[in-house]
Amino acid sequence: MKTIDIEYAIIGAGTAGLGAYSKISRKTDSLVMIQDGPYGTTCARVGCMPSKLLITAADYAHHIDASEFFGVKTGGTVDGPKVLERLRRERTDRFVARNLSYVARIPAHHKIEGRARVIGPGHLIVGEDIEVKAKKVILACGSRPVISEVFQPVMSRVLTRVC
Ligand SMILES: Cc1cc2nc3c(=O)[nH]c(=O)nc-3n(C[C@H](O)[C@H](O)[C@H](O)COP(=O)(O)OP(=O)(O)OC[C@H]3O[C@@H](n4cnc5c(N)ncnc54)[C@H](O)[C@@H]3O)c2cc1C
C-alpha cells in the first residue's frame, strides 16, 4: 500500500472540487485531488450546460407552435437528431473540452484516480492500494437528485440526466 501524507485532500473533481483546487493550489503544493470516473464535471457533461441547450431548442419549438396565433406563419418542424447532434457537439467540443484542458494542466502529483473511502478522520483509502493521510479533507463529491413524491404520476417523463 502506497501512503501519501498531505495537507489537503479534495474528493471529487467536479465544479466544486476544481474550484477548491484552483484556490488551494495557489497557496500550497501539498494537496491531492481524487476523482472517480470521468473528468469534465457533471455540469458540463450531463447537467446544467447541455440541458440548457435542450431547453432553448424546446423554447424555439414552442414559438413555432404558437406563432400563428399572433399572425406569423412559420411552418417549421423539430429535427430531433439534429438538436441532439448540436447538443453533443457543443458539450464535447466546448464545455467538456475546456474543462479537460484545465485538468490536463494540473500536475500529475496532484491527481489521483479512483474511489476514495473515508476510514477515519483525515484518513482515506483510494481504490485498494493508496492510503491518503490529510490534515484537511474537502468533500466535493457531488449529489444525486431527490425527486419529490408529487412527481410519481409523471415519473416516466422526469429527466435528471441528459445523453
Ligand atoms: C440535468 C441537470 C441539469 C442541471 N441544471 C442545473 C442548473 O441549471 N443550474 C445549477 O446550478 N445546477 C444544475 N444542475 C446541478 C449541477 O450540475 C450540480 O449541482 C453540480 O454539477 C454539482 O457539482 P459538484 O462539483 O458538487 O459535483 P460533480 O460535478 O458531480 O462532481 C463530483 C465528482 O466527484 C466524484 N466522486 C464522487 N464520489 C467520489 C469518491 N468517493 N471518490 C472520488 N470521486 C468521487 C464523482 O464521480 C464526480 O465526478 C443540473 C444537474 C443536472 C443533472
Image (tube, rainbow, N blue to C red):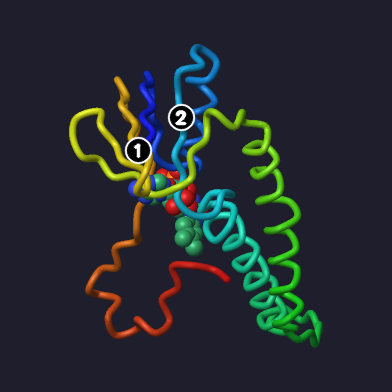
Judge by depth and name the residue closer to the eye, 24 or 163: 24
Judge by depth and name the residue closer to the eye, 163 or 123: 123
User: Could you tell me which quadrant the C terminus lies in?
Assistant: bottom right
Secondary-structure class at tag 2: strand
**Residue at (34% x, 59% y) in the render:** 144
Label 2, on which residue? 32
Labels 1 and 2: the sequence-earlier one = 1
Q: Amino acid at mark 2?
A: Val
Judge by depth and name the residue closer to the eye, 13 or 3: 3
Tell me: 157 left or right of 51.
Answer: left
Tell me: 49 left or right of 101.
Answer: left
- Seen as rendered, the residue at the extreme front is 1
**Residue at (37% x, 43% y) in the render:** 129
The numbered dot on residue 1 is: 1
Tell me: 105 left or right of 20.
Answer: right
Secondary-structure class at tag 1: loop
Q: Nearer the viewer, mark 1 or mark 2?
A: 1
* Mark 1 Cα shell of 10 Å, populated few (<14), some (14-19), many (≥20): few
120 vs 39: above or below: above
